[in-house]
Image: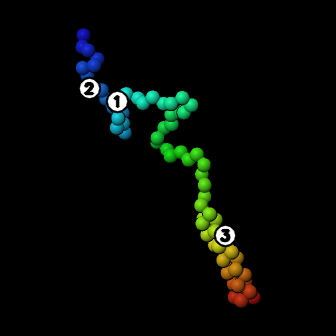
Amino acid sequence: MANPLDKPRQLPPGCVYDGPALAVPPGQRVRSKRFGHFDDPVIPRSYWYLTACLVASALVIGLLVGRFLLG
């Protein structure tokens, strides 16, 4: 009977490491690294300012178009 350790092990596609697993400290969970995980998604303040400026400028342009071009 052949020893099962003599056969080469087939790795799944995308597997880059086939060594022993690392011990996880108590209180932590192991997550899949396939998708990024964000604990606290924060939108930078500059994006809020940019959005507010775009909305305000669209409002002003709409009022000017309505006053001078359509009226």
- Which residue is drawn at the image coordinates 51% and 36% (left, top)? 31
Asked whether residue 13 appears in the rendered view, the answer is: no
Amino acid type, mark 3: Ala
Q: Give the answer, above or below, for where 31 lies relative to 36.
A: above
Q: Secondary structure at mark 2?
A: loop
Kindly identify which residue carries mark 3: 52
- Which residue is drawn at the image coordinates 74% and 86% (left, top)? 67
Q: CA distance from mark 3 to mark 1?
A: 52 Å
**Residue 3 rendering spot, x and y as whole percentages:** 26, 14
Q: Give the answer, above or below, for where 12 lies relative to 53.
A: above
- Give the class, few, some or many, for how many residues have Cα within 10 Å of label 3's Cα (few <14, many ≥20): few
Q: If the image is split into quadrants, where does the C terminus sit?
A: bottom right
Asked whether residue 63 appears in the rendered view, the answer is: yes
Kindly identify which residue carries mark 1: 19
Q: Are marks 2 and 3 in contact (CB under 8 Å)?
A: no
Residue 43 shown left or right of residue 65 in the figure? left
**Residue 11 rendering spot, x and y as whole percentages:** 33, 31
User: Which disc, if any, is residue 8?
Assistant: 2
**Residue 69 rendering spot, x and y as whole percentages:** 69, 88
Q: Secondary structure at mark 1?
A: loop
**Residue 60 rendering spot, x and y as whole percentages:** 70, 80
- Which mark's residue is nearer the viewer, 2 or 3? 3
Q: CA distance from mark 2 to mark 3?
A: 60 Å
- Which mark's residue is nearer the viewer, 3 or 1? 1
- Which residue is drawn at the image coordinates 56% and 47% (left, top)? 38
Give the camera-side residue of 20 and 69: 20
Q: What is the total number of numbered labels drawn onto the structure image?
A: 3
